[in-house]
Image: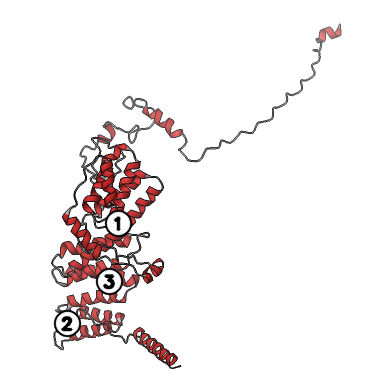
Amino acid sequence: MQLDHTLRYTLALGALAGLFSSCGLKRHPYENPITKDTQQPDKVLFDKAVHDMEHSRYEIARLTLQTLINTYDTSEYLAKAKLAIADSWYKEGGAHGLAQAEAEYKDFILFYPQMEESAEAQERVCDIHYRQMEKPDRDTNQALRAQEECKELILHYPNSKYAPVAQQRLREIQEVLAQNEFRVGEFYKQRGSYPAAANRLQALADHYPLFSDNDQALWDLADAYHKMGDRFENQEAAAYSRIVRDYPLSGWANNAKERLRAMNRPVPAADPEALALEKYNLENRGKKGFLAKAIEPFESRPDTRMAAKTGNPNMQTFQPTVPVSVPPPNGPAPAPGNNTVGAEVSAAVVNNTTALDQGKDARAVPPGQTGAATPAAGGATESAQATAQQPLPTNHPVKLKKQKKSKKAKPAPAAETSAPAPPAAQTQQ
């Protein structure tokens, strides 16, 4: 009986605390207050807005900060006020609030790029997309956006205190993106599309070397090359060699050595730096508990506990590659990992305005000329007109309408012919 009373009392206190927090009575300290003790009107407005933000009255706080910006346009607290507006949207959360926060943080970085708070604003932008990142088997748009924003922070603010945080987030983001590529490669492999599987797994191994299952990806890559035929034996041996050299603690290392010996290929030694990196990541890798495994199917956020804890993430943009099974137009086949698709387009200004009508690919009928073909056209007009009369191509068979057979007209009955009347003179006779 006493236990039931204690349980009811505890539940009542919890419900009361939740009610107070929902009503804005719980205080959330603001991270960027102004410590200067003064009673200037702009400082008073800023402190009032901070007090409202700490008690979850974000709309009132933004109105106060906007009043400060519009009224005191020469105030020393303008930058702080603009950053506080972005922080209010960030704290409010939700899809709309985070989108508004990102826009405000971008404006702050644009207007105040030299301030220390610019690095914090860029970190918040990275965190906005990181918080909305989904599982590897779902849309990766937010993960790609988070990756770009974290790279922006590391490149532009390398000495900031937020750079190590962004670097670790980048490892976790690339773990999710690599898991997505790995699943696609495994899908192609299971369906027997080995060139497509090899292309995906090769790009994965080259671009995401810190991926937790990279040894498995390399083993499947070698198996895909093996099933593609003897022509890809060099690529198969290269995948086995990478397992032995870069992932010596992997469970596939001994099998890869045996395959290399069976292929009469040299077995490389383990890389000391790769060995130390793999050992550290294995020792500090997070593990899933029983409860985490139970609720994992119901979560929308990806599990990043398997991500590496050290090592430099790839800062290059992921580029699609051409499968090695595709013959190049000219020259030998590209080496593995260096078969990036080219997408360069050049343009030039044409000064000769008559090139369109008099060049090699001159049009059949120049503007303003119709009718019979000219000697220069060489009868091209007639062929163009004949082509224009042909029906347009279609995917549906054209059904010709059958003409109804007209009933044959019966011949008109011949008129009865009578002998010609004799002349009048003969009749008189």
Give me the C-alpha separation between circle 2 and circle 1: 47 Å
- Could you tell me which secondary element the residue under label 2 belongs to? loop
Q: Are marks 2 and 1 in contact (CB under 8 Å)?
A: no
Reading the image, the residue beneath label 3 is 101
* Image quadrant in which the C terminus is located: top right
Determine which of the numbered discs, if any, sits on residue 34 in the image: 2
- Circle 2 crowding by C-alpha within 10 Å: few under 14, some 14–19, many from 20: few
Give me the C-alpha separation between circle 1 and circle 3: 36 Å
Is 152 in front, or is 322? 322
- Could you tell me which secondary element the residue under label 1 belongs to? loop
Viewer can see residue 127: yes
Instruction: Name the residue type under label 2.
Output: Ile
- Horizontal relation, residue 409 to residue 241: left or right: right
Q: 163 above or below 353?
A: below
Residue at 81% x, 10% y is 422
Q: Position of residue 67 (x, y in %)?
A: 24, 81
- Horizontal relation, residue 50 to residue 299: left or right: left
Q: Position of residue 140 (x, y in %)?
A: 33, 59
| Pair 2/1: label in front | 1
Instruction: Name the residue type under label 3.
Output: Ala
